[in-house]
Image (cartoon, rainbow, N blue to C red):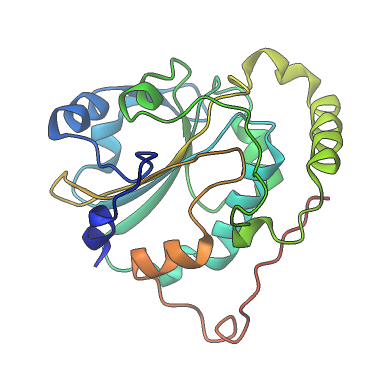
Amino acid sequence: MASQELNKQDASGARTPPTSNELQEAFGIEVYDRDGERRPLGDIIRGKRSILIFTRHFWCLNCQVYVRIISEKIPPSILPADTQIFIISNGSYQPIDTYASTTSSVYPIYTDPTCQLHQILKFKSTLKEQGPGEETKDYMQGAGTAMGRIFGGIKVALGDIKNTPYIGPKAQNGGEVIIAADGTCEYMYRMQNTVDHTSVAELMRIIGATPAADAGTHSSVRTDLS
């Protein structure tokens, strides 16, 4: 089960679960929806097993790819009962509509402009790219070079210039947290670089999502940065 993932020890602290006190503090932090309405995180997730996907800033192409593929490969129809997914960014709420359209997200998108959640959950702040010998996550396979993604990010920025003040800290990384219906942490992963979300295949396994019949024969994950 997903809780077994918490037993994995590593020097980076990437998988170290938050304490119960940290979780309670996190549940009290208000997040904003696409309309600028705010609610405590705990109210949004209460009563259901919740997968929280913390992305980087709204212009990060790497995270846009991740959200798009999560929506394609893990649609609501294959989630276990009483399981929900939320996308949480770190800028202001103004770019949410554009982000939802760009990523074709099938899941609600919220944001914490204060980054208090990121601090409580100890997400890293770094612009470090994937290093030599480090694993290329499945969602990044075929995504091109770092330089190509930088130019792609510039293209996105120019097309959404009005939201420049609202996109969030460029160095703030995120990760994945799974909160059980009883409020305990089942799984924790903190990105160690800018392309280090939990792999989609691993996340599906941890969630217990059953692939749709027509997708079960495909082992690769499509990444389209256009």
Q: Nearer the viewer, residue 61 or 111?
A: 61
46 relative to 105 in the view: left or right: left
Residue 88 showing in the rendered view: yes
218 relative to 4 in the view: left or right: right
Q: Quadrant of residue 42?
A: top left
- 105 to 125, vertically: above or below: below
Q: State the image coordinates of residue 109 (x, y, percent, origin top left).
A: 50, 39
163 relative to 135 in the view: left or right: right
- The residue that appears at 18% across and 51% down in the rendered structure is 181
Pick the quarter of the image with the N terminus.
Answer: bottom left
- The residue that appears at 70% across and 61% down in the rendered structure is 141
- The residue that appears at 32% across and 26% down in the rendered structure is 39
Q: Nearer the viewer, residue 154 or 192?
A: 192
Q: State the image coordinates of residue 33 (x, y, percent, origin top left).
A: 46, 30
Residue 104 showing in the rendered view: no
39 relative to 134 in the view: left or right: left
- The residue that appears at 52% across and 48% down in the rendered structure is 197
Q: Nearer the viewer, residue 34 or 158?
A: 158
